[in-house]
Image (cartoon, rainbow, N blue to C red):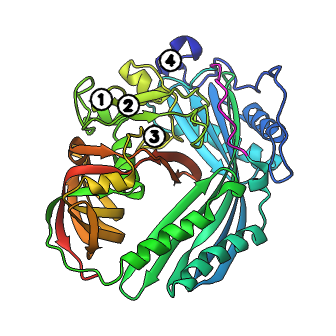
Amino acid sequence: MGHPELRQGPARPDRAHRSRRRARALPQRASGRRQLSGVTVGEGALRSICDRALQAVDGDQAEVVVIARNAALTRFANAAIHQNVVSREAELRVRVVRGTRVAMVTTDRLDDEGVRLVARDASDLAKITPENPTFGGLAGDRDLVPAPSAYVERTAEATPLDRARAAKQLCDAARGASLSAAGYVATNMQELAIANSLGVWAYSAATTSDAELAVLGDAGSGFAQRLSLDVRTLDIAGCAREAVDKAKAAQKPRDLAPGTYEVVLEPYAVRDLIAFLGSQLTGNAVEEGRSFVTGKLGQKVTGDVTLVDDPFDPKGLPRGFDLEGQPSQRLTLIERGVAKAVVYDSQTAYRTGQKNTGHALPPNPFQPAAPMHLRLEPGTKTREELIKESKRAVLITRFWYTRWVHQLRTIVTGMTRDGTFAIEDGEIAYPVKNFRFTQSYHDALGGTLGIGRDLSLLVPGEQFGLQVSSYRVPALRLGAFTFTGATQY
């Protein structure tokens, strides 16, 4: 994992049946426990659950992760609310190490009996699971750097009436333009606690509020999203205005022949590029030879763009540690087109002799680490200037149904959606029917001609029951993007 002095090494295989040190409860630190509003479980209660689980485990090492989440959603269609739901969920994950055998068991029970049973099952499973000779032990205790708070009590306590009022504002805007509206308004509160028998303890509470609006006419649609930690600053009016204006402009689209065009990408489309490329900027992808930066660190891989992973960005969704409770580092992944770094979790770092950067996801066989706070650094151009500088181009609101074709070459296939327009002589000329595309994303980024100055915070990606990634991205002007087919709408 890059810091062997901070961990207890694995037992020798011939002693895998014996504990060198029984998993134990966490030592208490001097820092006080945070107690938030009544809608949270609270740091103290979550630490108690972790302690009980660690005490119940039989193994050389153990790790406990607790996720508690309140999710509230108000969904509407045809300008009327049709769904209003609130879910309160909790998940307890116990990972037990015996020698180089590792097992994990999950439960949704946080009571004493549930904790005891999941610890027992994980301990028993660790006795019979196959050995993993590349496992380097759990990550040890390291000092965490405090991140800006991502918790806003007013968001955690938002009511159905708050969400209904926001939904009504979105629907009214579409109705006023004689258009149909569909979308949602959501508020979420998420607590994360991580502990292990080597002394790791990490806790965070975070809130988000977000809105999404799709506006449809007879022959065209528009789209907008907004995201904020604080429900009071969620820009509902801006979301409504953007989606309605886009839908009005998108009516009666014309045919445009497929081919390679210069493009101006709205932030929603840029997010898709960054999400796909970011998933390849990991030590595991480099190790397996499927990353576009494999063997190219220090070399030019894109146009003059700078991509950072910043867990301390106060305008993002900050959290200063990863899913192993390790401190997350701010990393410049690509600097003015040059590949600078990739992210690591403890196990990939251990296998490859690299430094753990604190970017672990929950243990899984597919992607052990990922950059989780991506920001594409802004340029100097307004959106209007990017369009004005384009003689013949296509303006794209967002991509839809995107899938890998070839990971190493970052070739992705998908479609445009919710507002695609022809640009002629620096002006939006007319709406066009949606395209299908097959395009190398990093090749497209290699032809960067302009970068917007305004960053949009966009709805985070969710995996393993967690909001694990956020994006702050600008609009982009790219020199070449290949559309392989056209649709009839």
Provide the secondary structure element on which disc 1 rests. strand
Q: Nearer the viewer, mark 1 or mark 3?
A: 3
Residue 333 — which label?
Answer: 2
* Quarter holding residue 85: bottom right
Q: Is residue 308 magenta?
A: no
Q: Which residue is mark 4?
A: 12
What residue span does the magenta drawing correspond to?
A: 142-151
Residue 339, numbered label: 1
Question: Mark 1 or mark 2: which comes first in sequence?
Answer: 2
Residue under the image location 70 percent in, 57 percent down: 231
Q: Where is mark 3, residue-wise? A: 375
Q: Looking at the figure, which quarter contains the C terminus?
A: bottom left
x, y (%) of residue 154?
78, 54
Above or below residue 425? Residue 357 is above
Whether residue 442 is visible, yes or no, is: no
Horizontal side of 147 relative to 456 (left or right) equals right
Left or right: 45 with respect to 223? right
Mark 2 / mark 4, whichever is N-terminal: 4
Residue 362 is situated, as x and y percent measured from the top left of the image, at 54, 41
Label 3: few (<14), some (14–19) or many (≥20) C-alpha neighbours in 10 Å:
many
Residue 343 spot, x, y in % from top left: 42, 31
